[in-house]
Image: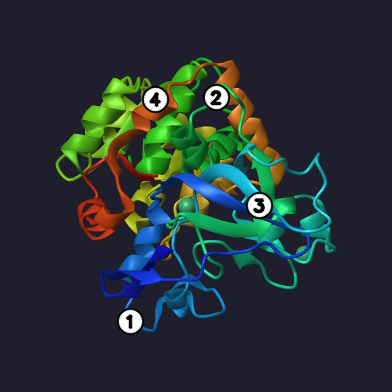
Amino acid sequence: MRGVVFLGDRELVLQEFPDPTPGPGEVVIEMKASGMCGSDLHTYRAPKGGAAASLGLGGNVTQVIAGHEPCGVVVARGSGVSDRQAQIGQRMMNFHYDGCGVCHHCRQGWSQMCIEGATVYGFTGHGGHAPYMRIPASTLVPLPDELSFVEGAAISCGAGTAYNALRRMGVRGGSTLAIFGQGPVGLAATLFAGAMGARVFAVDIAPERLALARSFGAEQTINSAAEEPIRLLKEWTHGQGVEFALDASGAPEARAAAVRACRAWGTACFVGEGKTVTLDVSQDMLRKQLTLIGSWTFNITGQADCARYVADNRIPLERLFTHRFALDEAEAAYRLFDNQTIGKGVFVF
Ligand SMILES: [Zn+2]
Ligand SMILES: [Zn+2]
């Protein structure tokens, strides 16, 4: 089979790999959808040979199949995999991290935080941008019947990250919420928060993405290349600022603006990976009684909860996907995604 491998410096190849066969406790899933996530761009853009260091990950991330939003069907089971874990033909997502299974974090389903170090599928283990993928059965998350494979792909990282950040923040009906960055995570947050009844103010620098945000239920949009987000957010909230601000961009200015746009007793949350930010702690946080949350994706039960939420509340998650590609089109797909003007892209098989 052929899988997408990022070479660094915005180059990728479709490289030949042997078809995987499952070992003990493992399954092979046949891919039906494999999403493109903002964090893929970090590896795609990293200098040749420097991707692992830039991501803070061990191993050589440029020799693995990319894609950490896989969704498909179980086609092979290794020894020791029970019927309750996986049945042939069962529709499955993958929790894209695997750890020791024994440490405190692993036992709580947060294997990305494993004290022994985690395998991250699509970065340090073979991911979903290929027709088949071998994974431990313990990383499978069943896809509810109501959901499509592309929706399962979205939940597997970008949308799941957005959902779990909103839950941690405690966003509820009537809340005012500013979302900085309307890439795949920010757009999913806009969609979910709108469905939860929050008043969403969406910020980005791409008019295309702001138009999507508006169509997903954002009450107002701000193009921060031309407009001043903090001033507008205060204006729309009677001078107070927003109750909640989410940064999905990772940009230092947006992170600082998210904190500063919050009103007294507000909550800001960082989900976008990026560079450092400088804050005036007294002015920006302490005197405002601000709560600041760092939120890194979700745990394995959080992924299942998000899928259940999308199914039960009929969230139109498919609308996130503005582009669908065949795997052969990977080069053009990532070149387009790199412009950061489209919604979410997905490979369909
Ligand atoms: Zn562990
Ligand atoms: Zn991701």
Give the CA separation, mark 4 to mark 2.
Answer: 19 Å
Q: Identify the mark nearer the N-term, 4 or 3.
A: 3
Q: Identify the mark nearer the N-term, 1 or 2.
A: 1
Give the CA separation, mark 4 to mark 3.
Answer: 44 Å
Q: Nearer the viewer, mark 1 or mark 4?
A: 1
> Neighbour class for label 1 at 10 Å: few (<14), some, many (≥20)?
some
Q: Quadrant of the C terminus?
A: top left
Side (left or right) of 149 relative to 343: right
Q: Do the numbered discs 1 and 3 sit on residues whose CB atoms are within 8 Å?
A: no
For ligand 2, tell me if the residue under mark 2 lies within 8 Å: no
Label 2: which secondary element: helix
Judging depth in this view, the residue of 79 and 318 nearest the camera is 79
Up the image or down, 81 lies above or below 195; here it is: below
Query: How many numbered circles are shown?
Result: 4
Q: Identify the mark nearer the N-term, 2 or 3.
A: 3
- Residue placed at 24% from the left, 36% from the top? 209
Up the image or down, 91 lies above or below 257; here it is: above
Q: Nearer the viewer, mark 4 or mark 2?
A: 2
Disc 2 target residue: 310
Q: Identify the mark nearer the N-term, 1 or 3.
A: 1
> Neighbour class for label 2 at 10 Å: few (<14), some, many (≥20)?
many
* Colouring method of the image: rainbow
Disc 3 target residue: 76
Label 3: which secondary element: strand
Judging depth in this view, the residue of 43 and 83 nearest the camera is 83
Amino acid under disc 1: Lys
The image shows residue 221 at horizontal and vertical percentages of 26, 29
Amino acid under disc 3: Ala
Label 1: which secondary element: loop
Amino acid under disc 2: Val
Disc 1 target residue: 48
